[in-house]
Amino acid sequence: DSGVTQTPKHLITATGQRVTLRCSPRSGDLSVYWYQQSLDQGLQFLIHYYNGEERAKGNILERFSAQQFPDLHSELNLSSLELGDSALYFCASSLRQGDSYEQYFGPGTRLTVT
Amino acid sequence: GENVEQHPSTLSVQEGDSAVIKCTYSDSASNYFPWYKQELGKGPQLIIDIRSNVGEKKDQRIAVTLNKTAKHFSLHITETQPEDSAVYFCAASGTGFQKLVFGTGTRLLVSP
């Protein structure tokens, strides 16, 4: 158990809908990263938050957005969902953003868009 | 940007054999190289990592080596056990925001 929690574990929804994925980092960790894992694209970095502020964006679609709240939990919002958005979504947390600190992954949310 | 290549994509060994997985990276500024193990239905689990100021690191049956000149790093698992069966991912991270760029994964199967 990494100490990172994600809810829900599974999510099934229809095209065009909007969903919110939630992540709670390990106690004391200030950084949250979101990754998408699909069969054809592998593990792809989406976005990084540090202590409530967005710090880096990766291959994140404009239909996707995220935020990190004062209690350091983070939410990833996916809207206008398409079939191709079906994937595993992981968040990871680390202590701080500098000096290459280890990232610990949560169990993931499996999103199925039908 | 950074690109990480990983080989082989699948690896089958007998219990007790050694397994080696190799990765190459493109960005010479990368300075942190973790390895993750992912079991079915679970998130990636950090098993070992190495920083660019170190050439080799060992933790029990697992070791990682780094060749900065050639820009490649490898995971070595000795005395493999069936519970080592999983998908292994290498990753690289540079300075700044520490996003991880992952390799495509190696499916390791250890047969009893």
Image (cartoon, coloured by chain):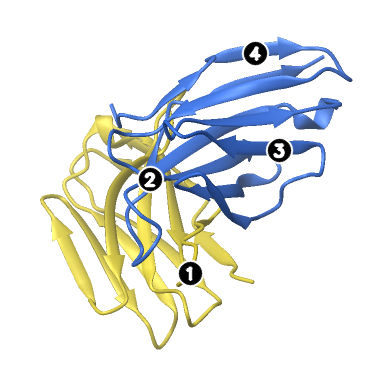
Q: Position of residue B24 (x, y in %)?
A: 49, 71
Chain bearing mark 3: A
Tell me which residue sits at (10%, 50%) in the image.
Answer: B60
Tell me which residue sits at (83%, 13%) in the image.
Answer: A14
Q: Amino acid at mark 4?
A: Leu
Give the colour of chain A: blue
- From the image, tell me which residue sits under label 1: B96
Give the colour of chain B: yellow
Crowdedness near tag 4: few (<14), some (14–19) or many (≥20) residues, C-alpha within 10 Å: some
Crowdedness near tag 2: few (<14), some (14–19) or many (≥20) residues, C-alpha within 10 Å: many
CA gap, disc 3 and disc 4: 17 Å
As displayed, is residue B73 above or below residue A38? below
- Which quadrant would the N terminus of chain A be assigned to in this image? top left
- Are the numbered discs 3 and 4 placed on the same chain, yes or no? yes
- Which quadrant would the C terminus of chain A be assigned to in this image? top right
Given residues A112 and A79, the one toward you in this image is: A79
Dot in front, 2 or 4: 2
Q: Amino acid at mark 2?
A: Leu
Dot in front, 4 or 1: 1
